[in-house]
Image (cartoon, rainbow, N blue to C red):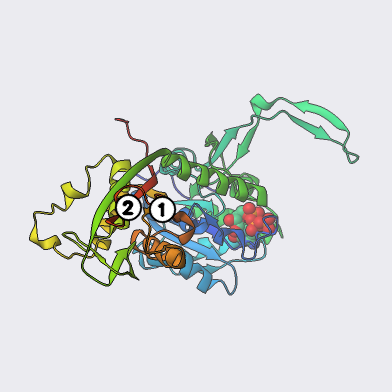
Amino acid sequence: MPTSSNAPEHAPKVAAVICAAGSGLRAGGETPKQYADVGGRPMIARSVKLFLDHPEVATVSVVIGPRQEQLYQSALGEMTSHAKLLASVEGGATRQSSVRAGLKALASDMPDIVLVHDAARPFATADLVSRAIKTAIAAGGAVPGAAVTDTICAIDDDGARGATLDRSGLRALQTPQAFRYADLVAAHARAAEAGRDDFTDDGALFAWAGGTVTVFGGEARNVKMTTPDQFEDEALRRAGLAFLKRGDVRTGTGFDVHAFGSGDHVMLAGVAVPHVAGLSGHSDADVALHALTDAILGALADGDIGAHFPPSEAAWKGADSAVFLADAAARVRAAGGEIGHLDLTVIGEAPKVGPHRDAMRSRIAEIVGVSIGRVGVKATTTERLGFAGRREGLAAMASATIRLPFREEF
Ligand code: CTP
Ligand code: MG
């Protein structure tokens, strides 16, 4: 095949075509697999971002399926307005025809080098892109190939094992593949003229048209997401990682007492409960929220409620104790952690907690931002023994279980 150019002297202009017009039949999802979630963002968004972020890539053309513009726009979000990104183009029935559509969209741009990448390979790295470009500049065509780790054999039509192939001489081919743009366009035109529409990768088409293709080192992680079990494994792996990242599980305890004083209700776990007396204290005297606040601060090893909200400060006079608990919960989040569970025991003869239990659980859950299933509320009397038994006041004890990220110093 004719070589239209030698390695350009100036910094070469590099463009990328992302193929995302397949229907993902083997993956079998509701939408084509390129729009499926991988670690919190659609696979296509990851693949496109790699090239938009790459300093050597100037233009990106994405090839999508018919009637997928809306899916595409919402998958890419803010990236759709990126200066490097061309308007999407519609692909064809085969990967080869989709690539051709993407190449055509770059015609007015006339890049020196074009990268062709499968949207279904979301784990390729910037280093792989750089090496593809470098190899294509030197060789004309560049294809990443990973060493084969399985034993590979031939089989006959009945599945009987044939010869074992020497895997040291084999490579599993990946994308991004890189070529001199004009040469790849010419190779695609020749294939179309010859009625060939069955090339599953551009390296094979380029070589068929007479071009030289160098295989350079691929990346084991650069898999093509193809089957449902690959998506399930990936989701499990991510969930496991997310869990491990917060594997520093801690428990804290808290305890508080307030004496009864004048009034006709007590504040308990953020709920006004009618009673023959009120609770006296500097703030709203909510023993339950104070015990919970201390439990969380204890789990964080971050002082106690009095250290953060000194009773000597006028600001906290009559304060809604929800402020203290919300602050403790915010400290957990600021440390990159989350609250796993809160448990509260109210100690006293009266008022009865039972009728208000779910209102209290729900209010606590709301203050700290967890679901109600993560909050336990219980109560006990002390069999009329001690200050609580003599109805002189109420006590509360609490525990908090939190998960923090592992850090070096722990
Ligand atoms: N592709 C394309 N146009 C086609 C077929 C495939 O742009 N007509 C793209 C796919 O979107 C994918 C890449 O080429 O990013 C590799 O193809 P493959 O993994 O086979 O994806 P699908 O063809 O979508 O999946 P399947 O073969 O399971 O239907
Ligand atoms: Mg396919």
Judging depth in this view, the residue of 7 and 199 nearest the camera is 199
In the figure, 218 relative to 116: above or below? above
Which dot marks residue 388? Answer: 2
What residue is rendered at 41% in x and 44% in y? 126
Can the viewer see residue 188 in this picture? no
Q: Position of residue 99 (x, y in %)?
A: 57, 59
Q: Badge 1: few (under 14), some or many (20 or more) residues near its Cα, within 10 Å?
A: some
Q: Which residue is mark 1?
A: 381
- Of residue 400 and residue 150, the one placed in the foreground of this image is 400
Residue situated in front as seen by the camera: 329 or 337: 329
Residue 135: percent from the left, percent from the top?
46, 38
Under tag 2, what secondary structure?
Answer: helix
Give whichever of discs 2 and 1 has the lower sequence position.
1
Residue 118: image location, x then y, percent = 55, 53
Name the amino acid, label 2. Ala
**Where, by quadrant of the figure, is residue 188 drawn?**
bottom right
Disc 2 packing (10 Å; few <14; some 14–19; many ≥20): many
